[in-house]
C-alpha cells in the first residue's frame, strides 16, 4: 500500500488573510483562510508583495473551466520562505524567492536542454491544485477547499508552491520590482531576447501596447533594435510608450481603407524583421504574419485568445516566403537561470523595471487594482501585503 505524502514534522497550518474569488467577475472577498503545511517538495511562502496581471482578470471573469470558485488568484509575487516540506534542498527558511507559473524541474529532458523552457515533468496548465500531489493547501474557516491558481496563488499572506516553481533570489532586489519578473515583464522582455533573438539594427513591430507589449519594446531596446513600431487603437498610449523604446506609432483604428499589415509593409519597405502579437486575437496574429519580412521574418505570439480559437494562415505564405511563426510562453525564459540574468540587468540599470510600476496599494484595496487595470489606467499595480 502506497504511503500518503506527509507534511514536514512539526509544521502546523497558518491562519491568514486572503483575497478570495467567490463569484466570477465580482469583487474579491478578503477573509481568513487556513494554509496547510507544505508536503514533500513544497515550500510555504510569506508573500511580501504581489502584482496584478491581465491573466488574473481573464480567469476571474470566467464562469466555466478553467474558471473555478472559490479560488485565490495572483501569480506575480515576491516572498520569504516560511517553511519547507520534506526533500527540499534548493531553498530554506528565510530565503527570498520569486514564485513563477512556469516549472523548471531541472531534471527532465526539456529542462536540461537549452532548446526549450517547457518542462515535460510539470507541463503548463490552469490546474486548481498542487502539481505534484493533486490537492489544495487552502481551506476556508468552514473547512471548504479553496482552489489554487497557476501554482502560485499570491493573493494571500501565505501560500504553498512546489519547489519546481520557486526561484531563490538576492534579497537586495526591491520586492516591488522583483515581483514583476514572475510573469508579465519577464514574458515580454524574454520574447524579444530569447524567443525572437532580436538582432541589433533590426525592425520590430508590436501589436498591442499594454504591459506585455511595452515589455517586448523594452527587450527589443536592450537587444539593439533600431526601429520599434508600436501599434494600438488607443492614441493615449503612444507618448508613454516612448519611455520603453518605441520609436514610431500606428493608430490601427484610423487607417481608412488600408489594413495594418499593408501600412507596416509600406513603412518598412517589405515588412518588419520581427512582429509580436501581444493582444490575444487570431485576426491580429494573421496581420502580424502578413507584415513580417519574407525570407527571415518571425512572428511571435504572446497574447492569449479564448479557448478553441483557430488560426488561419495562407499555406503558400509559409512555403514560398520563408516566414516563421512561433508561440512564446513566459518569453521562452528558463526561470531558474534566466531570471537571474534579468535581475543582473536591473541592478546594472540596463533593464528599467521602475517605469512599469504605475501604482502601489495596500492589500485591503486589492479590488482597486482590478478597477485600474480594467479601465486601462495602469501598467502594473503592486499590492503590499502589510499595508
Image: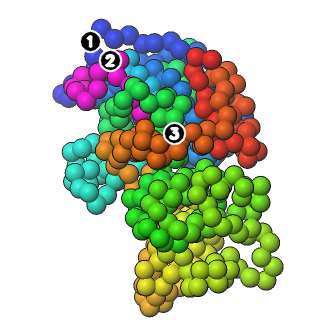
User: How many C-alpha atoms fall within 10 Å of the one at disc 2: few (<14), some, or many (≥20)?
Assistant: few
Is the C terminus in the top left, top right, bottom left or bottom right quadrant? top right
Location of residue 133 by image quarter: top left
Q: As rendered, which of 346 and 324 lies closer to the eye? A: 346
Q: Residue 313 versus residue 248: which sits nearer the camera? A: 248
Query: Which callout, 2 or 1, points at the residue further toward the start of the chain?
Result: 1
Helix, strand or loop for disc 1: loop
Is residue 93 within the magenta segment?
yes
Q: Which residue is mark 1?
A: 9
Observer-nearest of 152 and 277: 277
Is residue 370 something one can see in this rendering? yes
Q: Which residues are magenta?
A: 83-104
Q: Position of residue 172 (x, y in %)?
A: 41, 27
Residue furthest out toward the left: 1
- CA separation in Å, label 2 and label 1: 14 Å
Asked if 126 appears above or below 50 in the picture, the reply is below
Which circle, 2 or 1, is nearer the viewer? 2
| Residue bearing mark 2 | 93
Indicate the secondary structure of the residue bearing disc 3.
helix
Q: Is there CB contact under 8 Å for labels 3 and 1?
A: no
Q: Residue at x 56, y 80 (%)?
A: 271
Between marks 3 and 2 in the image, the one whose residue lies nearer the viewer = 3
Q: Position of residue 39 (x, y in %)?
A: 31, 24
Residue 130 sits in quarter: top left
Identify the main secondary structure in magenta.
loop
Q: CA distance from mark 3 to mark 2?
A: 23 Å
Residue 305 can be seen, yes or no: no
Counting residues from the start of the chain, the first of labels 3 and 1 encountered is: 1
Q: Residues within 10 Å of mark 3 (few under 14, many from 20)?
A: many
Residue linked to disc 3:
180
Amino acid at each position: 500500500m502506497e504511503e500518503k505524502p506527509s507534511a514536514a514534522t512539526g509544521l502546523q497550518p497558518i491562519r491568514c488573510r486572503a483575497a478570495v474569488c467567490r463569484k466570477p467577475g465580482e469583487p474579491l472577498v478578503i477573509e481568513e483562510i487556513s494554509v496547510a503545511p507544505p508536503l514533500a517538495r513544497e515550500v510555504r511562502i510569506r508573500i511580501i508583495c504581489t502584482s496584478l496581471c491581465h491573466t488574473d482578470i481573464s480567469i476571474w471573469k470566467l464562469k466555466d473551466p478553467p474558471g473555478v470558485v472559490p479560488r485565490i488568484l495572483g501569480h506575480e509575487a515576491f516572498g520569504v520562505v516560511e517553511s519547507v516540506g520534506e526533500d527540499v534542498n534548493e531553498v530554506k527558511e528565510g530565503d527570498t524567492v520569486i514564485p513563477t507559473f512556469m516549472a523548471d524541474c531541472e531534471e527532465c529532458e526539456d529542462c536540461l536542454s537549452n532548446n526549450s523552457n517547457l518542462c515535460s515533468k510539470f507541463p503548463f496548465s490552469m490546474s486548481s491544485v498542487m502539481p505534484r500531489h493533486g490537492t489544495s493547501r487552502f481551506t476556508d474557516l468552514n473547512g471548504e477547499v479553496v482552489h489554487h491558481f497557476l501554482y502560485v496563488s499570491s493573493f494571500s499572506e501565505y501560500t504553498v508552491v512546489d519547489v519546481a516553481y520557486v526561484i531563490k533570489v538576492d534579497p537586495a532586489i526591491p520586492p516591488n520590482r522583483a515581483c514583476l519578473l514572475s510573469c508579465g515583464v519577464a514574458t515580454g522582455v524574454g520574447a524579444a531576447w530569447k524567443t525572437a533573438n532580436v538582432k541589433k539594427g533590426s525592425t520590430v513591430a508590436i501589436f498591442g501596447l499594454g504591459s506585455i507589449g511595452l515589455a517586448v519594446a523594452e527587450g527589443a531596446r536592450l537587444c539593439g533594435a533600431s526601429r520599434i513600431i508600436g501599434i494600438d487603437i488607443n492614441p493615449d498610449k503612444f507618448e508613454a510608450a516612448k519611455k520603453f523604446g518605441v520609436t514610431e506609432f500606428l493608430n490601427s483604428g484610423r487607417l481608412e481603407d488600408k489594413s495594418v499589415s499593408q501600412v507596416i509593409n509600406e513603412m518598412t519597405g517589405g515588412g518588419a524583421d520581427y512582429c509580436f502579437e501581444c493582444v490575444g486575437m487570431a485576426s491580429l496574429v494573421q496581420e502580424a504574419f502578413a507584415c513580417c519580412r519574407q525570407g527571415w521574418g518571425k512572428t511571435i505570439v504572446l497574447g492569449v485568445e479564448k479557448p478553441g480559437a483557430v488560426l488561419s494562415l495562407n499555406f503558400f505564405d509559409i512555403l514560398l516566403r520563408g516566414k516563421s511563426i512561433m508561440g512564446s510562453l513566459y518569453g521562452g525564459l528558463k526561470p531558474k537561470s534566466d531570471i537571474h540574468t534579468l535581475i543582473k540587468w536591473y541592478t546594472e540599470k540596463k533593464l528599467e523595471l521602475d517605469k512599469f510600476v504605475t501604482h502601489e496599494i495596500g492589500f485591503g484595496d486589492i479590488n482597486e487594482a482590478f478597477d485600474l487595470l480594467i479601465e486601462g489606467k495602469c501598467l502594473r499595480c503592486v499590492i503590499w501585503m502589510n499595508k
